[in-house]
Image (spheres, grey):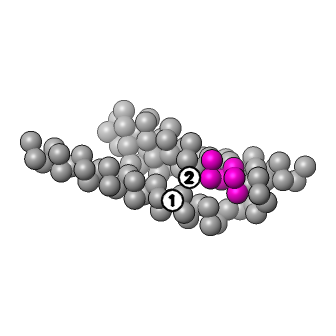
Amino acid sequence: MRNIANNTMKMKVTTISGLILAGFALLTSSCSSGSNARTGTAVGALGGAAAGGIIGHQSGHAAEGALIGAGVGAVTGNVIGGKKDNR
């Protein structure tokens, strides 16, 4: 029973650490630099991480799903925000 609890705790710590690192990296290195692009990057990363974590959890890979979702969401948010900045 302890192994299950330890594995669950390790997965939560890994997921949270990965999300924090991915979010920080994405916020500091967005492709477009306008205010809408930065906001879009942040919102996209958070939304993508949440969606990816939920989807990944269904297949037993919550951390990987969250990281992939954060990356895809950040890029998508940056592109959309950059287009708004260019209007």
Q: Which residues are magenta?
A: 38-43
Quarter-wise, where is residue 48 in the image? Answer: top right
- Spot the residue most to the top: 58
Left or right of residue 82: residue 2 = left
**Visible residue check, residue 69:** no
For the point 38% across and 48% down, the residue is 63
Mark linked to residue 71: 2
Q: Secondary structure at mark 1?
A: helix
- Spot the residue most to the left: 1
Q: Give yes or no for contact between labels 1 and 2 (Cβ–Cβ under 8 Å).
A: yes
Give the image location of residue 78, x and y in percent: 70, 53
On-image quarter of the N terminus: top left
Q: Amino acid at mark 2?
A: Gly
Q: Name above or below for residue 22 compared with residue 46.
A: below
For the point 38% across and 43% down, the residue is 62
For the point 34% across and 56% down, the residue is 14
For disc 2, the neighbor class at 10 Å (few under 14, some 14 to 19, many from 20) is: many
Give the image location of residue 74, x and y in percent: 62, 51
Q: Secondary structure at mark 2?
A: helix
In front here: 12 or 55? 12
- Spot the residue most to the right: 87
For the point 17% across and 45% down, the residue is 5
Quarter-wise, where is residue 23 in the image? Answer: bottom right
Left or right of residue 79: residue 23 = left
Give the image location of residue 35, x and y in percent: 77, 57
Which residue position holds label 1?
22
**Visible residue check, residue 44:** yes
Mark linked to residue 60: none
Q: Name above or below for residue 17 compared with residue 12.
A: below
Left or right of residue 51: residue 34 = right
Q: Magenta segment: does it hold 65?
A: no
For disc 1, the neighbor class at 10 Å (few under 14, some 14 to 19, many from 20) is: many
